[in-house]
Amino acid sequence: HAHGRPLPFALFMATAMSITAFPVLARILSERRMQHTPVGTVAMASAAVIDVAAWVMLAVVAVIVGASGQSSWRIWLTAGYVLVMLFVVRPVLQRVASAYERAGQLSPGLLSWVLIGLLASAWATQWMGIHFIFGAFLYGALMPRSDALLQEILRRLEQLAVLFLLDRKSTRLNSSHLVI
């Protein structure tokens, strides 16, 4: 056990051992041409569910480790955060999706709400002592399943990524190509 705290160590090891090598499984099924068979579909779906459960468990372990030696306020704060995400943020995201469908396009205002919510969720989990990726993950999991909306958000974010992460001289990107 790690530094006299066997529970967090045991939980971490159990979680780490339960995570599947999802890309490896996908490659194996693809090479054997089994990805579209019933067995391949069940294997991929099961691996996806197990991986999501493992990430959730990893977040719980992070809270337990962060709360070890401290008061349990982080555990209660995390529970409150999840409840707010489910019962406040999720309905707001549903309204954003409805506004997108009514307008037929993703306005800069709607995109701003999505990005502000994403960053706020990531910041909240980081502040609570959980890695920010869990906040971003939960926010993404609560996004409405509208393919058109998700594709539009991805298209806009790709433009921002190109603008900020790639050298403008090498890509010859100028402001006339950017539509936000």
Image (tube, rainbow, N blue to C red):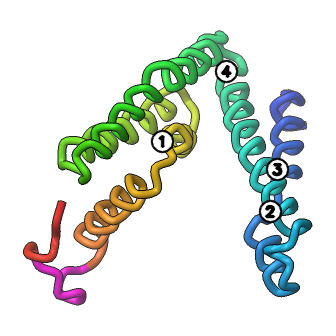
- Inspect the magenta stretch and tell me whether residue 169 lies in it: yes
User: Which image quadrant is residue 74 in?
Assistant: top right
The residue indicated by pointer 1 is 143
Question: Which callout, 3 or 2, points to the residue nearer the camera?
Answer: 2
Whether residue 32 sits left or right of residue 117 in the image: it is: right
**Disc on the earlier residue, 3 or 4:** 3
**Disc on the earlier residue, 1 or 2:** 2
Give amino acid for label 3: Ala
Front position in the image: 67 or 146: 146
Give amino acid for label 2: Met
| Residue name at image x 82 percent, y 87 percent | 31
Q: CA distance from mark 3 to mark 2?
A: 19 Å
Disc 2 element? helix
Q: Are marks 3 and 1 in contact (CB under 8 Å)?
A: no
The residue indicated by pointer 4 is 67
Give the percent coordinates (x, y) of residue 147. 46, 56
The residue indicated by pointer 3 is 16
Give amino acid for label 1: Met
Which portion, as a residue range, is magenta? 167-174
| Residue name at image x 75 percent, y 36 percent | 57
Give the percent coordinates (x, y) of residue 97. 37, 41
Whether residue 91 sits left or right of residue 59 in the image: it is: left
Give the percent coordinates (x, y) of residue 157. 32, 61
The residue indicated by pointer 2 is 44
Question: Which callout, 4 or 1, points to the residue nearer the camera?
Answer: 1
